[in-house]
Structures are given as C-alpha cells and as structure tokens.
Image: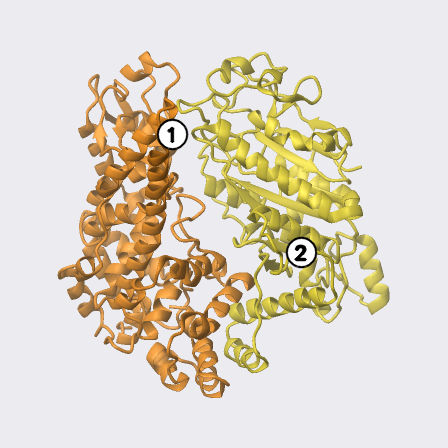
Amino acid sequence: MERSAFPDRRRFLRNALSLGCSAAASPLLTPVSLASAPWDARLVVIILRGGMDGLDVVQPYGDRNLAGLRDRSLGFGEAAGAADLDGFFALHPALAPLLPLWSAGELAFAHAVSTPYRDKRSHFDGQDLLEAGTGFAPGVPVAKDGWLNRMLQQVPGLEAETAFAIGRDNLHLLKGSAPVANWAPGTDLSLSPQAERLLKMVYAEDPQFRDSAAEALQITARLEAARQAGADAAQGGTSRPAPSPGHVRVAEFAADWLRRDTRIAAFSINGWDTHQGQKSGLATALGRLSDTILTMRTGLGPVWQKTAVLAMTEFGRTARENGNKGTDHGTGGAMMLAGGAVRGGVVHRLWPGLGESDLYAGRDLLPTADVRSYAAATMRELMGLDRQVLERAVFPGLDMARIGGVIL
Amino acid sequence: MTLDPTLAAIRFGTGRAPHLPDPAGADAMLAALTGPDRMAVAHPVPSFASIYPATREIAEIDAARRAGEATEEALARKTALVRGFRAQQAELMAVAVARGLDSTDPLRERLTWFWADHFTVVSKRMETRSAAQMYVEDAIRPHVTGRFVDMLTAVATHPMMLLYLDQHQSVGPHSAVARKRPGLGLNENFARELMELHTLGVDGPYTQDDVRELAELLAGMHGTHRTTFVYKTQRAEPGPETVLGRNYGRREPKFEDVERVLEDLARHPATARYIAQKLAVHFVSDRPDPDLVATLEHRFTESDGDLLEVTRALLTHPAAGLRPMEKAKPPFDFVVSSLRALGMQGRDFRALDVAALRRQVLTPLARMGQPWQAPDGPDGWPEAADAWITPQGLAERITWAMGLERLWGLEMPDPRDFVRTALGDVAGRETLLAARAAETRGEGVALVLASPEFQRR
C-alpha cells in the first residue's frame, strides 16, 4: 500500500466510501466531489522569471566583502535607503512598503538558496527545473508535470478550482494529472445555448479542446453566479470601472478565489533579468511584487492569517556588477515567504560569505540550501504533508535536511 | 505520405482561401519560394535605417531638455515622433497580416515567422517600437532561402539584436574604452543566447567559460537605435579567446575574428541537430518523427547550412504529409488564417485605422496569450499545443471568432460553404454538422474557426 500524503483525509475517505485500498492511488474516486482540499491553509507560489538578484533585494550589508562587489552603480545598506532587517541584512528600498509585514512577523526570506541547477545559467532551463522540481541529474529529462501539481496528485478527488494557475502563460509548476484551473482576470466565455451545445459536439473527440472548453465554461459560469449574487467589488470580473495594472488584477483575482474554496494559486511576475540599469529595473519589478503581496493581503482579509506566499526565482545573479550597471546570470539567490501563516521577521540562511574564495565558480553567491526544501517545509508545516511524500513524490531525491520552522 | 494541397496550405502556408488556390504540393511551394518575393513589394516594410532621422531628432530634443533649453514646441515634437512609432507598429502588424492574406507563396511568410521567432528580438525602447519588423525585413527575410551563416551574421550585426541582448553596452574589460572609463565592462547576455538559443542549443557542448570568452570576442560589436552597426576596436577585448576549444582573436581585435566564430558556430554539428529539431517541431509535430529530424540534420550539414535545401528536405519528407494535424496554430497564425478563410484581402485589412487594429487584433492577440512582438524572452513563443490551448486562451479564441460579425462588420458566408472553404477534406463529421446546425451565420462561421481542425495544422 502506498503512503498517503494526508493520513487523516485518507481515513475519512476510507470510512465514508468503504475503500479498501489506497485512496490516493485509486482512479475510481472521480465521482467524489469535495468542496475543497483536506486542509484549510492557502498557498500561493509566485515564479519570478528572469533571475532575481537576491544580493540586491536582501542585501548582506554586514558582510564586509559586499562593498568590493557592489561598488559601481549598485549601492546597498542604509546609505542606499535600504532598511535594516536584522543587523546583517537590509531590505531593498523598493520593498519598503512590506516593512510593516516584517515587523508584524508576516514576512521572511531564505538566502543563499537555489535549485540544484548549475553552470549553464539558462533562464529557460532554470525556470523549467524550478517548476518541475526534479530532473537535475545529468541525462534525466525534465519532468512533464510541475511539483505543485505532483503535490495535488497526492490528494484524491480534488475539484478543479482547488488550484488555480492565473494569467496567460501556462505554468509548468501546476501542469500534470491533478485537476487545476487556468484563467486570467477579464476573460469570459459567453455563448448562446445552441452555440455551446454545438461547440461541445465539435470538441468531443479532441481531449485538449474538450477539457479546456469545459473548464472555461465552468469558470465563466461561476464568475457569473458570483456577479449575480452581488458579491463584493473585489471580483475578478469585467465590470471594474478603472482597470488596475495587470499584476494587481492577477493578485485581486487570486485573493477573490482563495477567499472561497480555492486553496492553491500560482502565477508569475516577469522583469528580473537586470543585465543593465539594475537600479531602476529591479525597483520596478520589486514594486510589482510588493503591490502583489499587499493586494492579496487586503483582498484575503482574515484568510491572510492562514496564507503562505512563496516567491521563487530560477537563479540569482553575479555577485559583482557587470560593465553595464547590472548583473549577469548567477547561482545562489533569495526567496521570499509572506503571509499570516509564515514565521516572519527572519532571514533563513547558512551564510557562505562573499570573499573571493567563498563565491561559487569565483563569481556567484554560493548556494548553501536547496530552495525546494523551503517549499517542501512550507507544505509540510502548512498542510501537514508527510516528509517522505515530499522527498519521494513531490521533489524526488530531495533531502529536506534541517530545513524547517518556516510556518508558525 | 506526399503532401496534398489542402495540408500544404494549412500546415506550410497561411491557410486556405476562397479566392486563392491551394499550392499543388511540395514542389509548387518550393518553386514559388525560389521565385521573386512578391509580398515584399506589394506590402513593403521599411528598413531599420528609416528610423534614424526621428531617433536622432529625439536625441537632440532630449539633450536640449537636459540642458534646460528645450522649447514647448520641441517637446511636443518629441511626443508626436514617439506616437508615430506607436502607430507605425500597428500599421506594420497590418502589413504582416496583409502578406499572409494575399500570398500565393505563403511558405515564405511561414519561414520568415519561424526564423524571426528563432532570432527573437523585443523592443526595449519607445524609439524602436516599430522596429522589430524592420529587423526581420533586413536580417531574416532575405536569408530564409539562403545560408544559415548569412542569416546568423546579419542578425548578429543588426542594431536591433545588439540592443535587445545588451551587446551595445558590452565593453572588453581590457579595452581602450574600459581603461578610460572603469565603470564599463563586459555583458554576457548576447554571447550566452547566441550559443544557447541561436546555434548550439542549450544541450550543446558549451560551458560558462565559453560564454565568457565569446562575450570577450564579441565586445566591439556595436549599433544602437541611432547608429548603424560598427565594429569598434577601442571597445574590443585585446588578446586571444578560446571558444569551444578553438582560438580566435589576436592582440589587435578585428571583426573578422567574430565572423570566424559565427561561421564555426553555424557549422557546428550541435547547431545542425538543434535547427533540425526546431524545424520539425514547428512545422510538423511536437514529437516529430526521428527520421525527419535526422534527415533535416544531414541535409543541413551536407549543404553547409543551405536553408532552401533544408526546407526542401522538410516538405518532401513523408512525415510532412501525415495526418492527423497535431500542432496548434499560435494566436497570430490563427487570426491570419481565419481572415484569409473569410476571403479578406490585404488592402482591406490595411485600410483599418490604428484604433480598429488595436481593438480587433492587438488586444485580442494579447488576451489569447501572444501580445504582438512581445514574447517573455529571447526564446520566443512556445511550440507545444498545450501552451496555447488553455481554458483561458481557448476562451479568447472562441470569443474573437464569435465577434467577427459584430465587431468587424464582415459579411458572413453560409457556414455550410465556409466549412468547405476553410477546411476542405480535413473537416470532421461533427464540424460539418455544427456548420449546418448553427442558429446564425456568424455562429456557424465561428464554430468552424473554433474547431480543432481549424485550430490545428
């Protein structure tokens, strides 16, 4: 018998349905319709595409070697307007709007982290592997499904709206056999009854079109029902008077569904590839991240208290500035954890130092922890996932080692 | 399977049309490709150099403003110039569509779109808003039937690519310029993508050291939105560099060193393999027949990167004519082929004003997941059908098709005829039935356009 990720849930299902074998592995469970996942916490994963410069976002100003590396255009520490966090790290000024969260214990970081991806420093491979969560060994193909979907595969009988991939890119992170909704705020599929019937007929033989259309119709119907029920103004709908910027609408849409039965949401924020003019480029991207977090915090209301938001990137950037007031692709970087459920006010790290001989390949921050361990620890502590399931099914081959204490 | 006319039009062209015949087959398509480029004449695109007068004027106005000497008139002039670039971007989108609508040599359009995506550029400044297509016209289109190395060299020396991948700012660490201005230095961005995306592929046999050495070799490659390409020796890195085990460069850096490394990258076996795989995936299947890939790879190598010969190998391989159709058209290709199937002509499309182009094409394309000329990165648009046929993306395609009658004011054909025009014998039973059973002409046409047979190729 396979181990179940959720012992309590499985016991419930077995009692309710008199199933003798593993519920998690049973394909016969599809008729069971659950209102939500067997946990109440909310998890949001944001993929920061382009390679966020962890050394500039959470600045190790207490490391005496930083000055020699960031000595051209990139300032750091209080002189550059960065607020002190813990006497060693300072927060980039563009994230100043999140300082109240830090004080309230709702914001944390993990530093000197990365996936096991090394040396080629390709965005596209780096992102695929970050989202697949496996396939790092030489010759091993990247998994077709994403780690967040593999986590959902451990839970039987989920509804599609339990997990949401938001936005117009198809997130690898949530791809896989577990049902996941995919939508962007503002889209509607309104058809006449006859057109809808005929469309279903035309799509009947092509699973890709059939399933996508069915889900589009279902989500549209739910959005419409919510609108007609006169739900509050924070709908992801089309009737908003003054449209907010795209990233804010995505955050509003996420919060709107997470307030209800949705438990997982994932989306991406682009714009981190700061090869040149990092000072302004990074500030813009961080502004979007900060808006996103604050919009969700407002939109979630009391649900924020049981929410964890993870923001992860494919790799960090070179420790030294390059010749264009920017930084090139590197290795170790930083990750953000936010939310009422998070144990905040801490920068998790095993600091490797920034001396010449401390750097990875003489150029990058040396990763001292696997960024996947923090995602795994979050799922373990937030939702009660079993460590073995995390290390075997969700992130095959991961050793979570000592990583823990990320959730309250 | 020999490539039949219907599949030739759909898989290797821009779709079927009521007013134009399908290509007779592979030979006819290849013959057209070796003939004159009629669409470049019928619907011209200016060269990148055409933006210089305006970009230089903007630079002068900016300089005056910094000196506190810009007049109100000058600032208004700058706003007008920038608006002009924005409008031109929409107009040039219309040119790209018009070529797809009118062409009797549509494989040339498809190859141009393929190679433009392979060598993706995205505008990063307001002055180059309309310039991505000029770059394609200058550096890509003339070479789609030429040699790969010539396209690679044209791309690598085009200011639009140098701007996009930050090469215009990369300076050799020991160059004359860096010695004078210690703030300047190397930028690896272009060197990395040149190997990872343009030639060897990410699985290719290069290392971080190769990236670094190539970046040093490329320092000196310069061109901007105001200046043509120049190899600037005072920005170049002196001394030899080793890329993939070969030595390039001397104490006196020269552009010839860059040309040599580009030739070697273009001829590398990993490049042949990578290009063969990409072509097969783009035109035939997300999981292409290994024999097709091997054939293309050999042809690429044997012909020393002659792209006409590689294209010939693609169209004449048995896999080219195989059904069913597996690929999903990207949104732009879907829009062009829909309008072509409705019999719209290039001049009518180009008669739409900029506001209509935004409302009817640019905004819908973004909502379908393909904002015009704005992919997320230098790897261009995704190929896999499941990247496009998402619930959200499909909903937007259906909504666009359903809006054609109302939003475009187009005369809707009888759906029973339209399904034959658009799909010929690839129309399935259910789609034929839906075309007959729809309540209105507009819905019938939209259902045909939304059908898997029309969305795939």
Query: Is disc 2 surrounded by few (<14), some (14 to 19) or many (20+) residues within 10 Å?
Result: many
Estimate the x, y position of residue B202 in percent, counting from the top left. Answer: 40, 42
Estimate the x, y position of residue A108 in percent, counting from the top left. Answer: 70, 32
- Per the image, label 2 sits on a secondary structure element best described as strand
Q: Is residue A378 visible?
A: yes
Tell me which corner region of the image, top left, top right, bottom left or bottom right, holds residue B111: bottom left
The circle on residue B188 is 1
Amino acid type for the residue under numbered disc 2: Ala
Q: Which chain is orange?
A: B
How far separated are the C-alphas under marks 1 and 2? 38 Å
Q: Residues at marks 1 and 2, common chain?
A: no
Q: Which residue is mark 2?
A: A163
Tell me which corner region of the image, top left, top right, bottom left or bottom right, holds residue B30: bottom left
Residue B71 versus residue B433 in the image, above or below: above
Q: Are marks 1 and 2 in contact (CB under 8 Å)?
A: no
Q: Which chain is yellow?
A: A
Estimate the x, y position of residue B280 in percent, counting from the top left. Answer: 33, 58
Amino acid type for the residue under numbered disc 1: Glu
Residue sitting at x 64%, y 59%: A178
Residue sitting at x 40%, y 64%: B329
Q: Is residue B412 left or right of residue A90?
A: left
For the N terminus of chain B, which image quadrant?
A: bottom left
Chain that bears disc 1? B
Residue sitting at x 72%, y 48%: A299
- Per the image, label 1 sits on a secondary structure element best described as loop
Q: Is residue B199 left or right of residue A380?
A: left
Residue sitting at x 40%, y 86%: B416
